Structures are given as C-alpha cells and as structure tokens.
Image (tube, grey):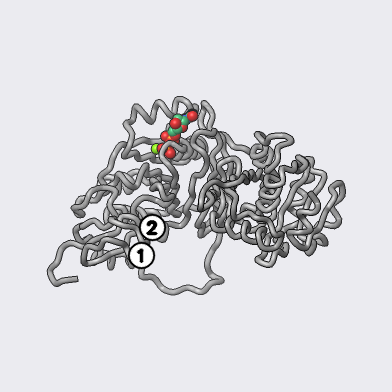
Amino acid sequence: MAKGKSTVFFCQNCGYESAKWMGQCPGCREWNTFVEEAVPKTVTKTTGRSRAGGEPVCLASIDLKEEERLTTHMEELDRVLGGGIVPGSLILVGGDPGIGKSTLLLQVCQQLAGDGRKVLYISGEESLRQIKLRAARIGSFADSLRLLCETNLSAIEETIRREQPQAVIIDSIQTMYGEEISSAPGSVSQVRESTHVLMQLAKGLNITIFIVGHVTKEGTVAGPRVLEHMVDTVLYFEGDRHASYRILRSVKNRFGSTNEIGVFEMKGNGLSQVPNPSEYMLSGKPEGASGSIVACSLEGTRPILIEIQALVCRSNLAMPRRTAAGTDYNRVNLLLAVLEKRLNLPLSGCDAYVNIAGGIRIQEPALDLGIVLALISSYQDKVISDRTLVFGEVGLSGEVRAVSQAAQRVQEARKLGFDTVILPAVSMEQAADISGVRLLGVRTVKDAVQLL
Ligand code: TYD
Ligand code: MG
C-alpha cells in the first residue's frame, strides 16, 4: 500500500483486500465487487486483544465444568448447536430475508428468559413496535428479556457491559456501525469491526452472542466470508420460502459436529419443531409416478429419507438442458455420463432435470444411486415401488461403492414402513441382522437397473 494512503479496496463478496481497484476479484472471481473504503483504524488497535496475557496452563488442570450448556428447550436447535448453547460463544445465523431468523432468535430469547436468564435483543432493523407484534404471535415473554433498537456499536458495547446479560441477539450485523470507520454499515470493514468488538465482548464477559447475517443471492453471508472465520458457530437457514418448513444447518461448529440439521415448520405462532423429518420430507410424494424414488442421506448423526425426482425427455436443443435443484449440478452430469457409457444409453440427446423435493440441499455421495435410478425410471418410464429405498455411491466405472452407516439407514427405512432396500453389496453385511426388510445388494449400476 502506498505510504500515507488512507483507503483500500475490499471485495464486497469475499473480503479480499487490495491497494488498487480491480475489475475481477482474484479471491472469489466475482466481477465489479471492489469498493473503496477507509483503512480500518483497528488494524493497529488489535494489539489490545491480548489483554489476558496470562500464564500457560497444562491440559489436565482445565476445568470442564464451566462448559455447561444452556438449553433452548428446542431439541432441534440444541442438537444443531452440539447439545445446547455454550456460554461465551459467538453464533452466526445466516439465511435469506424472511426465512425466520428473527423469529427463531426471539423464540430462543423466550426460552432463555423463561429460565430466568437475562437476555438482551438488539435490533437495528425493526422498531420496538414491530418486535412486539412478532412477539405477540409467538407467545408470552418473561421480564428478563430486554429490547433495544440501536445500531451504534459503542452504544451497544456500553449497554452490554452495563446490563451484563447472559445472552445477546444482534439483528443484524449488516446494520451495525462503528463511528471511527467511515464506510457505510454493511461494508466489509464495518462488518469485520463490529464482529471483532462483539467477539471480544463475548469472550471477555462470557456471554453468548447470536449474530444475524443476511445472505447474498449466491448463498453466503453478505459482505465478508471473514465473518465465518471469526465466529465459533455458523448456522444457515435453508428451505423453500414458499413452503412452510425450514432447515437449520450447522456448517461450522467449534462445540459440536457439523452438518447436523434441525427441521422446523413456520406456523402462525412462530417456528415449531419437526421431530420426524423423514415423514415430513416424504409427505408430498406422488404415488405410482415414474422418475421418483426415495433415497437416504445421513445429515450429521441422523438419517433422513428424501424424495429424488428426475425428468428425462428428448431434447430439441443442440446443447441439451440439464438442471439440478438441491444437489450438485456437476455430480448429476457425471452420473449421466456414467449411464451413457456403462449402459449405452443415448442420454446426451436428452434434457435431464433432477430435483430433491422439499427444498433441502444435499451433497452426500450416498445419493448417487438414487439419482441414477430416478433418471433411469424416468427415461424408461418405469415406476419404482413406493416402498423401496435406495442408497449407494456410484463410481466412474459404474460400480456401486460402500457408504457409511448402512445399518442406521436401513433402520430408518424399516421404521417408516419400507419393505425393500437397494444398497451396495459391500454394505449388506452391516445391515444383515435387521429383520422385516428385504435387502438387495448391487455391485454395479447395471445390476441396479436390472432390478427395476
Ligand atoms: P422473520 O423472522 O422476520 O425473517 P428474517 O428475520 O429471517 O428476515 O420471518 C418473517 C416471516 O415469517 C414472515 O414472512 C412472516 C412469517 N411468520 C409466520 O408465518 N408466523 C409467525 O408466527 C411469525 C412470527 C412469522
Ligand atoms: Mg429479521
């Protein structure tokens, strides 16, 4: 950076920092995302962070009792958090506008306040009246919940230090601003500075802070990905905004496993938990339709049954159209290529659409066999029985490979009344002692297709 220069350019998408303006960001390859911002003064201020500067201690002498978690009385949320809220943690909740972030956090407030804990809800987006209206739909609140409409960071810091609550909600980080930074709220340096201050508060006073973050259309928290590195836990809300269910997924968790999901339903009185998501995901499944099949994915510790839909039809375009909703587009193309090569099907002349029903996004390779069979079912117009479940990874030579936790998946299938499971032959052994379901082991995609 030139000497004495007081501005730098930040990519508003990923937080990449540059001394000069650039058309394309070298970090995330987005175009036109660089915005000039004043150099954050905190770059030099951060030395103040090592205030503790204590003695090193040995591992055995650390008392784990302090880690006792607070429960939100919402099992789905507690599980996603890794067993409850860890005091002193910084939790980021991201999601599309209107998906229910504020609602969920207000419900967390309700539960914590109900337990007699001091909670502070700071909103930079809504007036007290608006919060009251939302709260009226959710139910009654104990008096230990306090509300504040504020966007000034130093005022917020002062309030938190004075009130000493056990939990704080910041709704949302994009509206907060520090006075000493000249750029607009929501810009990279503002978001970074705000998060930094909040992190110090959380760690220093041992309070839990929930931060709401807006999401761009690409699906990452608006502004910097830097934010995700700074916080302890990142939770994302997924789901179709037009449907009533919402999936809360943990993508980073310093205090628990990741990829754990919680399923909620938006009702007239806030979000309510869905304890049996498989039943829920399959509720709209068409009967006797080709191109539809039930597969099993393991989300964190829990198997979830989902419906895969495929539509394959002759294409009139030079370049056939392919789409994948809810799963990896490249993976679908790869599976189509495997089918074309190993089964000699002329799929390159066909349009193919794949959809995971229910608005859930799943990347697990165990879905491969389900996608393949759904494609074949649609292509050959053959109906697959409603009571058949499939899972298995497909390799490039058309082989069906083992997946983890086969027994757990078969158990879930049995619980929901499935009578047949198509699975990798190598995983058969694991599930052999489960009675009441017929297991069909397959070694290659060809074997599986012959079963239809
Ligand atoms: P909200 O929590 O404001 O979303 P976010 O903070 O993520 O932007 O959720 C708003 C939506 O939820 C809105 O469309 C209304 C709906 N809603 C219900 O259906 N039932 C309810 O009880 C509440 C509080 C909201
Ligand atoms: Mg909101």
- Whether residue 123 appears in this view of the structure is yes
Q: Which residue is mark 2?
A: 225
The quadrant holding residue 118 is top left
Q: Badge 1: how crowded within 10 Å, few (<14), some, or many (20+)? A: few
Is the distance from the Cβ of mark 2 to the nearest ligand 1 atom less than 8 Å?
A: no
Gap in angstroms between the C-alphas marked 2 and 1: 11 Å
Q: Nearer the viewer, mark 2 or mark 1?
A: 1
The quadrant holding residue 445 is bottom right
Instruction: Name which residue lies at 68% across and 60% down.
Output: 393
Which is more toward the observer, 174 or 398?
398
In this rendering, position of residue 57 left or right of residue 260: left
Quadrant for ligand 1 reads top left
- Label 2: state its secondary structure: loop
Instruction: Name which residue lies at 38% across and 45% down.
Output: 214
In x, y percent, where is residue 44?
Answer: 23, 67
Q: Amino acid at mark 1?
A: Gly
Which is more toward the observer, 435 or 254?
435
In x, y percent, where is residue 339?
Answer: 67, 58
Furthest residue in direction left, as rendered: 4
Which is more toward the observer, 63 or 100?
100
- Label 1: state its secondary structure: loop
In this rendering, position of residue 88 left or right of residue 299: left
